[in-house]
Image (spheres, rainbow, N blue to C red):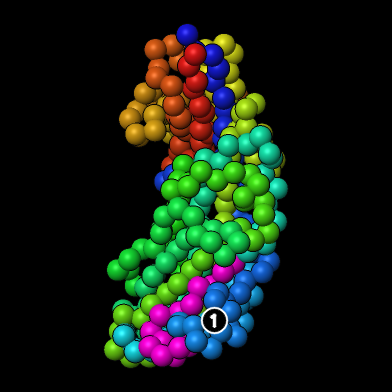
Amino acid sequence: MFRQIRVIMLIPVFLTSGMLAQNTGATDPTVSLTNPYTSCTICAGAVWANENNANIADGIFTTAALKNYLNCFQSSCYFSRYLNCTHFNFAIPSNATVTGMALQVKRMCSAGNAAMDSTIKLGMGNVFYGSNHAALGTYWGMGNSSSSYGDSVDTWGYAWQPTDINDSTFGVFIKVLNNSNADVTAGIDNVQLTVYYLLNSGMFSQTSSPSGFNVSFTGQNLVVSFSATGQNQTLQLTNALGQIILSEKIPDSSSALFTRTINTEGMLPGIYLVSVSSETNHLARQVMILKD
Protein backbone atom coordinates (compact mmCIF):
# COMPACT_ATOMS: atom_id res chain seq x y z
CA MET A 1 0.00 0.00 0.00
CA PHE A 2 1.03 3.62 -0.34
CA ARG A 3 2.90 5.03 2.59
CA GLN A 4 2.21 8.68 2.02
CA ILE A 5 1.09 11.38 -0.35
CA ARG A 6 3.16 14.55 -0.11
CA VAL A 7 1.82 17.87 -1.24
CA ILE A 8 4.80 19.52 -2.89
CA MET A 9 3.25 22.58 -4.45
CA LEU A 10 2.09 25.12 -1.89
CA ILE A 11 1.05 28.12 -3.97
CA PRO A 12 -1.34 28.61 -6.88
CA VAL A 13 0.45 29.46 -10.10
CA PHE A 14 -0.18 30.33 -13.71
CA LEU A 15 0.93 26.96 -15.01
CA THR A 16 3.89 26.67 -17.36
CA SER A 17 5.82 23.62 -18.49
CA GLY A 18 7.96 22.10 -15.76
CA MET A 19 6.85 24.53 -13.04
CA LEU A 20 7.37 23.37 -9.46
CA ALA A 21 6.98 26.02 -6.77
CA GLN A 22 8.95 24.36 -3.98
CA ASN A 23 12.16 26.27 -4.28
CA THR A 24 14.38 29.06 -3.11
CA GLY A 25 12.66 31.53 -5.40
CA ALA A 26 14.42 33.13 -8.35
CA THR A 27 17.61 34.46 -6.78
CA ASP A 28 20.06 37.05 -8.07
CA PRO A 29 23.83 36.81 -7.67
CA THR A 30 25.60 39.52 -5.70
CA VAL A 31 29.02 39.12 -7.34
CA SER A 32 29.72 38.75 -11.08
CA LEU A 33 33.20 38.72 -12.56
CA THR A 34 35.02 37.96 -15.80
CA ASN A 35 36.69 34.55 -15.56
CA PRO A 36 39.58 34.13 -16.35
CA TYR A 37 40.36 37.46 -14.76
CA THR A 38 40.37 40.70 -16.70
CA SER A 39 44.01 41.17 -15.68
CA CYS A 40 45.06 38.02 -17.55
CA THR A 41 46.65 39.55 -20.65
CA ILE A 42 47.35 36.19 -22.31
CA CYS A 43 43.85 34.74 -21.82
CA ALA A 44 41.73 34.34 -24.92
CA GLY A 45 38.24 35.79 -24.95
CA ALA A 46 36.51 39.16 -24.84
CA VAL A 47 36.27 40.72 -21.38
CA TRP A 48 32.90 41.51 -19.83
CA ALA A 49 32.54 45.17 -18.84
CA ASN A 50 30.71 46.24 -15.65
CA GLU A 51 29.98 42.63 -14.75
CA ASN A 52 27.83 43.42 -11.70
CA ASN A 53 25.20 44.87 -14.02
CA ALA A 54 24.10 41.22 -14.41
CA ASN A 55 23.06 41.11 -10.75
CA ILE A 56 19.83 43.11 -11.13
CA ALA A 57 17.15 43.12 -13.84
CA ASP A 58 17.14 46.85 -14.55
CA GLY A 59 17.84 47.12 -18.27
CA ILE A 60 21.50 47.99 -17.65
CA PHE A 61 23.82 45.41 -19.19
CA THR A 62 27.21 43.91 -18.69
CA THR A 63 28.62 43.75 -22.21
CA ALA A 64 31.26 41.90 -24.20
CA ALA A 65 32.56 43.32 -27.50
CA LEU A 66 32.91 40.32 -29.84
CA LYS A 67 35.03 40.29 -32.97
CA ASN A 68 33.80 38.62 -36.15
CA TYR A 69 33.81 34.82 -36.31
CA LEU A 70 37.20 33.09 -35.91
CA ASN A 71 38.99 36.41 -35.33
CA CYS A 72 40.71 36.07 -31.96
CA PHE A 73 43.83 37.41 -30.30
CA GLN A 74 43.82 37.58 -26.51
CA SER A 75 40.89 39.78 -25.39
CA SER A 76 40.09 40.85 -28.96
CA CYS A 77 38.10 37.77 -29.81
CA TYR A 78 34.94 36.38 -31.38
CA PHE A 79 34.05 34.56 -28.15
CA SER A 80 33.88 35.90 -24.61
CA ARG A 81 35.53 34.80 -21.43
CA TYR A 82 33.17 33.41 -18.81
CA LEU A 83 30.79 35.68 -16.96
CA ASN A 84 30.93 34.01 -13.55
CA CYS A 85 27.95 34.94 -11.34
CA THR A 86 28.28 33.83 -7.71
CA HIS A 87 27.38 34.67 -4.09
CA PHE A 88 23.69 33.82 -4.43
CA ASN A 89 23.46 33.49 -0.64
CA PHE A 90 21.42 30.31 -0.76
CA ALA A 91 20.54 28.61 2.53
CA ILE A 92 19.46 25.09 1.52
CA PRO A 93 18.81 22.89 4.61
CA SER A 94 21.59 20.38 5.22
CA ASN A 95 19.16 17.44 5.08
CA ALA A 96 17.68 18.45 1.73
CA THR A 97 17.93 16.53 -1.54
CA VAL A 98 18.45 18.83 -4.50
CA THR A 99 16.06 17.84 -7.30
CA GLY A 100 16.80 20.48 -9.91
CA MET A 101 17.92 23.97 -10.84
CA ALA A 102 16.43 26.47 -13.27
CA LEU A 103 18.43 29.36 -14.73
CA GLN A 104 16.98 32.49 -16.32
CA VAL A 105 19.24 34.79 -18.35
CA LYS A 106 18.04 38.15 -19.69
CA ARG A 107 20.24 39.01 -22.65
CA MET A 108 20.57 40.81 -25.99
CA CYS A 109 22.88 41.33 -28.96
CA SER A 110 23.50 44.44 -31.05
CA ALA A 111 22.73 42.49 -34.24
CA GLY A 112 20.56 39.55 -35.22
CA ASN A 113 21.88 36.13 -36.27
CA ALA A 114 25.18 36.74 -34.51
CA ALA A 115 25.58 35.92 -30.80
CA MET A 116 24.78 32.47 -29.45
CA ASP A 117 25.52 30.40 -26.36
CA SER A 118 28.88 28.71 -26.18
CA THR A 119 28.84 27.46 -22.58
CA ILE A 120 26.19 27.58 -19.84
CA LYS A 121 27.42 25.63 -16.82
CA LEU A 122 27.22 25.52 -13.05
CA GLY A 123 30.20 25.18 -10.78
CA MET A 124 32.02 26.33 -7.67
CA GLY A 125 35.55 27.30 -6.79
CA ASN A 126 36.19 28.08 -10.49
CA VAL A 127 35.52 24.44 -11.40
CA PHE A 128 32.68 23.27 -13.67
CA TYR A 129 30.48 20.35 -12.66
CA GLY A 130 27.97 18.50 -14.78
CA SER A 131 26.67 19.23 -18.27
CA ASN A 132 26.74 22.18 -20.63
CA HIS A 133 23.22 23.60 -21.03
CA ALA A 134 24.07 25.99 -23.86
CA ALA A 135 21.39 26.27 -26.54
CA LEU A 136 23.87 25.68 -29.33
CA GLY A 137 22.82 27.13 -32.65
CA THR A 138 20.14 29.45 -31.22
CA TYR A 139 20.84 33.14 -31.77
CA TRP A 140 20.37 35.78 -29.10
CA GLY A 141 17.72 38.35 -29.96
CA MET A 142 18.30 42.06 -30.35
CA GLY A 143 15.79 42.89 -27.63
CA ASN A 144 16.17 42.25 -23.91
CA SER A 145 14.65 38.78 -23.76
CA SER A 146 14.81 35.96 -21.22
CA SER A 147 16.09 32.45 -21.91
CA SER A 148 15.56 29.42 -19.63
CA TYR A 149 17.90 26.53 -18.84
CA GLY A 150 17.12 23.52 -16.65
CA ASP A 151 14.05 22.93 -14.51
CA SER A 152 12.78 21.48 -11.23
CA VAL A 153 13.99 17.94 -12.03
CA ASP A 154 17.22 18.81 -13.87
CA THR A 155 20.37 18.62 -11.72
CA TRP A 156 22.60 19.50 -14.69
CA GLY A 157 24.30 16.11 -14.63
CA TYR A 158 25.73 16.38 -11.13
CA ALA A 159 24.68 15.23 -7.64
CA TRP A 160 24.64 18.61 -5.89
CA GLN A 161 24.81 18.74 -2.12
CA PRO A 162 23.33 21.58 -0.04
CA THR A 163 26.83 22.57 1.06
CA ASP A 164 27.82 22.97 -2.60
CA ILE A 165 24.97 25.33 -3.37
CA ASN A 166 25.34 27.29 -0.14
CA ASP A 167 29.03 27.88 -0.91
CA SER A 168 29.65 31.50 -1.84
CA THR A 169 31.69 30.43 -4.90
CA PHE A 170 28.81 28.36 -6.32
CA GLY A 171 27.38 29.93 -9.43
CA VAL A 172 26.86 30.19 -13.15
CA PHE A 173 29.43 30.31 -15.96
CA ILE A 174 28.30 31.91 -19.22
CA LYS A 175 30.33 32.15 -22.43
CA VAL A 176 28.95 33.60 -25.67
CA LEU A 177 30.33 33.52 -29.21
CA ASN A 178 29.79 35.58 -32.36
CA ASN A 179 28.91 33.44 -35.36
CA SER A 180 28.68 36.34 -37.83
CA ASN A 181 31.24 38.06 -40.07
CA ALA A 182 30.77 41.44 -38.32
CA ASP A 183 31.79 42.73 -34.90
CA VAL A 184 28.91 42.79 -32.39
CA THR A 185 28.23 43.52 -28.73
CA ALA A 186 26.56 40.93 -26.50
CA GLY A 187 24.89 42.03 -23.28
CA ILE A 188 23.43 40.38 -20.18
CA ASP A 189 20.96 42.29 -18.03
CA ASN A 190 20.30 39.72 -15.33
CA VAL A 191 21.01 36.16 -14.22
CA GLN A 192 18.63 34.37 -11.84
CA LEU A 193 18.89 30.88 -10.40
CA THR A 194 16.18 28.82 -8.69
CA VAL A 195 17.05 25.71 -6.67
CA TYR A 196 14.44 23.00 -6.04
CA TYR A 197 14.83 20.59 -3.16
CA LEU A 198 13.09 17.84 -1.20
CA LEU A 199 13.14 17.36 2.56
CA ASN A 200 12.41 14.10 4.36
CA SER A 201 9.20 15.63 5.68
CA GLY A 202 8.07 16.82 2.24
CA MET A 203 8.64 19.66 -0.18
CA PHE A 204 8.98 23.16 1.23
CA SER A 205 9.00 26.67 -0.12
CA GLN A 206 10.25 29.99 1.18
CA THR A 207 7.02 31.50 -0.18
CA SER A 208 3.86 31.65 1.91
CA SER A 209 0.81 29.66 0.83
CA PRO A 210 -2.25 31.74 -0.14
CA SER A 211 -5.67 30.38 0.69
CA GLY A 212 -8.33 29.45 -1.80
CA PHE A 213 -6.87 26.29 -3.38
CA ASN A 214 -5.83 23.52 -1.03
CA VAL A 215 -4.57 19.98 -1.57
CA SER A 216 -4.08 17.65 1.38
CA PHE A 217 -4.17 13.93 2.04
CA THR A 218 -5.86 11.56 4.47
CA GLY A 219 -4.41 8.07 4.26
CA GLN A 220 -4.40 7.19 0.57
CA ASN A 221 -7.08 9.76 -0.27
CA LEU A 222 -6.16 13.06 -1.90
CA VAL A 223 -8.47 15.89 -0.80
CA VAL A 224 -8.84 18.91 -3.09
CA SER A 225 -10.78 22.02 -2.04
CA PHE A 226 -11.13 25.39 -3.72
CA SER A 227 -13.50 28.24 -4.38
CA ALA A 228 -16.10 27.24 -6.97
CA THR A 229 -17.50 30.72 -7.51
CA GLY A 230 -16.14 30.89 -11.07
CA GLN A 231 -17.62 29.51 -14.26
CA ASN A 232 -16.53 26.75 -16.63
CA GLN A 233 -14.03 25.31 -14.16
CA THR A 234 -12.43 21.89 -14.66
CA LEU A 235 -10.59 19.77 -12.11
CA GLN A 236 -7.86 17.53 -13.54
CA LEU A 237 -5.32 15.07 -12.21
CA THR A 238 -2.43 14.23 -14.56
CA ASN A 239 0.72 12.20 -14.19
CA ALA A 240 4.28 13.32 -14.97
CA LEU A 241 3.83 12.32 -18.62
CA GLY A 242 0.82 14.59 -18.98
CA GLN A 243 -1.63 11.67 -19.15
CA ILE A 244 -5.03 12.55 -17.68
CA ILE A 245 -5.96 10.37 -14.69
CA LEU A 246 -9.12 12.30 -13.82
CA SER A 247 -11.01 15.15 -15.47
CA GLU A 248 -14.17 16.57 -13.95
CA LYS A 249 -16.29 19.58 -14.89
CA ILE A 250 -17.19 21.60 -11.79
CA PRO A 251 -20.81 22.81 -11.70
CA ASP A 252 -21.14 26.60 -11.88
CA SER A 253 -21.96 27.80 -8.41
CA SER A 254 -21.95 30.80 -6.15
CA SER A 255 -20.99 28.65 -3.17
CA ALA A 256 -17.68 29.35 -1.50
CA LEU A 257 -16.12 25.88 -1.41
CA PHE A 258 -15.93 22.75 -3.54
CA THR A 259 -14.30 19.60 -2.12
CA ARG A 260 -13.35 16.47 -4.04
CA THR A 261 -11.78 13.32 -2.56
CA ILE A 262 -9.62 11.22 -4.91
CA ASN A 263 -8.65 7.66 -4.00
CA THR A 264 -5.05 7.04 -5.08
CA GLU A 265 -5.11 3.26 -4.64
CA GLY A 266 -3.70 1.66 -7.75
CA MET A 267 -1.85 4.77 -8.89
CA LEU A 268 1.87 4.34 -9.53
CA PRO A 269 4.32 6.24 -7.30
CA GLY A 270 5.57 9.50 -8.75
CA ILE A 271 4.72 13.16 -9.22
CA TYR A 272 1.19 14.17 -10.20
CA LEU A 273 -0.36 17.52 -11.03
CA VAL A 274 -3.69 18.60 -9.54
CA SER A 275 -5.11 21.59 -11.43
CA VAL A 276 -8.23 23.70 -11.59
CA SER A 277 -8.66 25.70 -14.78
CA SER A 278 -11.19 28.13 -16.17
CA GLU A 279 -11.31 30.52 -19.08
CA THR A 280 -9.33 33.12 -17.12
CA ASN A 281 -7.16 31.24 -14.64
CA HIS A 282 -5.14 28.06 -14.11
CA LEU A 283 -4.16 27.02 -10.60
CA ALA A 284 -2.11 23.95 -9.76
CA ARG A 285 -0.46 21.86 -7.07
CA GLN A 286 1.99 19.03 -7.56
CA VAL A 287 1.85 16.02 -5.27
CA MET A 288 4.26 13.15 -4.78
CA ILE A 289 2.92 9.68 -4.14
CA LEU A 290 5.36 7.33 -2.44
CA LYS A 291 5.10 3.56 -2.14
CA ASP A 292 6.50 1.18 0.48
| Between 140 and 249, the one nearer to me in the picture | 140
Percent across and percent down for residue 285 are: 53, 33
Q: Which image quarter: residue 214?
A: top right
Q: Which residue is mark 1?
A: 48
**In this rendering, would 114 be left or right of 156?**
left
Is 87 drawn above or below residue 41 in the view shown?
above
| Between 292 and 77, the one nearer to me in the picture | 77
Please report the bounds of the magenta region as a residue range. 72-85
Percent across and percent down for residue 36 are: 54, 76
Is 107 drawn above or below residue 100 in the view shown?
below
Q: Measuring 57% from the left and 28% from the top, which residue is drawn there? A: 7
Furthest toward the front, the residue is 42
Is 58 drawn above or below residue 15 in the view shown?
below
| Between 251 and 274, the one nearer to me in the picture | 274
Is 274 drawn above or below residue 128 in the view shown?
above
Q: Measuring 65% from the left and 40% from the top, which residue is drawn there? A: 205
Which amino acid, by three-letter code, is at mark 1?
A: Trp
Percent across and percent down for residue 114 are: 34, 80
| Between 253 and 45, the one nearer to me in the picture | 45
